[in-house]
Image: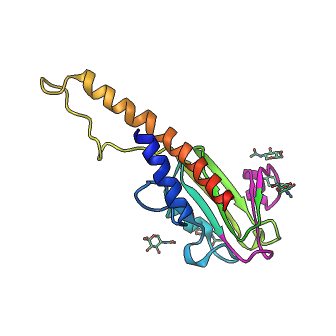
Amino acid sequence: MASRALLLAVAGVVVAGCAVGLSGATDHIVGANRGWNPNINYSSWSANQTFYVGDLISFRYQKGTHNVFAVNETGYDNCTMDGVTGNWTSGKDFIPLPHPGTYFFICGNGFCQAGMKVAITVRIFDLGPEIYPPPAPGADNPPSSSSSSSSFAAGAWPAAAAAATALGAAAIIAL
Ligand SMILES: *[C@@H]1O[C@H](CO)[C@@H](O)[C@H](O)[C@H]1NC(C)=O
Ligand SMILES: *[C@@H]1O[C@H](CO)[C@@H](O)[C@H](O)[C@H]1NC(C)=O
Ligand SMILES: *[C@@H]1O[C@H](CO)[C@@H](O)[C@H](O)[C@H]1NC(C)=O
Ligand SMILES: *[C@@H]1O[C@H](CO)[C@@H](O)[C@H](O)[C@H]1NC(C)=O
Ligand SMILES: *[C@@H]1O[C@H](CO)[C@@H](O)[C@H](O)[C@H]1NC(C)=O
């Protein structure tokens, strides 16, 4: 029940064009209000973000002038198409981040050398001990009950978030 409610909430929020909020999925707009353009230090931008599995990264730029290619680290370092896994050209591209790890994006129109490259590290969502502190073992908190609640927190949420992202991406394509 909880994950169905989450799916509906995320799909609705993504369709509305704003993935930030109650759903927990964040749309990371590359470059913020400066968008995807030459001569911006995207290392500084990405260092200021925390990317979780299930979030989106989005690129805003003038269609036809720039574009987005997902490449591997060789492609990122050298501004080449090495390891290319996808490309986007709409001018307002929402790219899901379904897996933990490092993602590399470059502009494929020759502007990579002018700084249009960004590397991000996506981590598994963690509810964190500050939200649900583990109960101290004792007569009132037998260890068996604390372990069952923490296994739900660790296992169920990332799966639901990944599924919600897939649905959100499908909704965008349907637009
Ligand atoms: C971009 O900013 C980072 C620090 O956030 C710095 O280490 C790096 O040298 C800068 N890159 C360029 C090309 O200025
Ligand atoms: C980093 O985030 C802070 C707070 O949102 C903001 O004030 C600052 O301008 C950001 N820095 C960069 C390089 O985006
Ligand atoms: C970038 O290209 C050079 C050769 O042009 C290569 O030696 C280097 O390994 C490449 N970078 C990475 C990260 O592979
Ligand atoms: C990136 O892809 C190229 C071509 O597929 C490959 O030769 C290279 O080893 C890859 N680099 C990394 C860092 O995986
Ligand atoms: C860009 O992606 C399309 C599919 O979306 C593919 O057909 C095309 O070959 C890709 N272009 C490059 C240069 O990788």
Which residue is nearer to you in this view: 9 or 109?
A: 9
Residue numbers of the magenta segment: 60-86
Q: Residue at x 60, y 65 (%)?
A: 43
Quadrant of the image occupied by residue 128? top left
Which residue is nearer to you in this view: 109 or 59?
A: 59
Specify whether 66 is left or right of 175: right
Which residue is nearer to you in this view: 174 or 95?
A: 174
Which residue is nearer to you in this view: 93 or 30?
A: 93
Measured along the vertical axis of the image, is residue 43 above or below residue 171? Answer: below
Q: Quadrant of ligand 4?
A: top right
Q: Quadrant of the N terminus?
A: top left
| Residue 117 x, y percent position in the rendering | 70, 65
| Residue 160 x, y percent position in the rendering | 49, 41
Q: Residue at x 79, y 76 (%)?
A: 65
Q: Residue at x 56, y 62 (%)?
A: 15
Specify whether 46 is left or right of 175: left
- Judge whether residue 22 is colored magenta: no
Q: Quadrant of the C terminus?
A: bottom right
- Judge whether residue 84 is colored magenta: yes
Colour pattern: rainbow
Specify whether 1 is left or right of 52: left
| Residue 55 x, y percent position in the rendering | 54, 54
Measured along the vertical axis of the image, is residue 139 above or below residue 133? Answer: above
Measured along the vertical axis of the image, is residue 48 above or below residue 137? Answer: below
| Residue 104 x, y percent position in the rendering | 68, 55
Quadrant of the image occupied by residue 107? bottom right
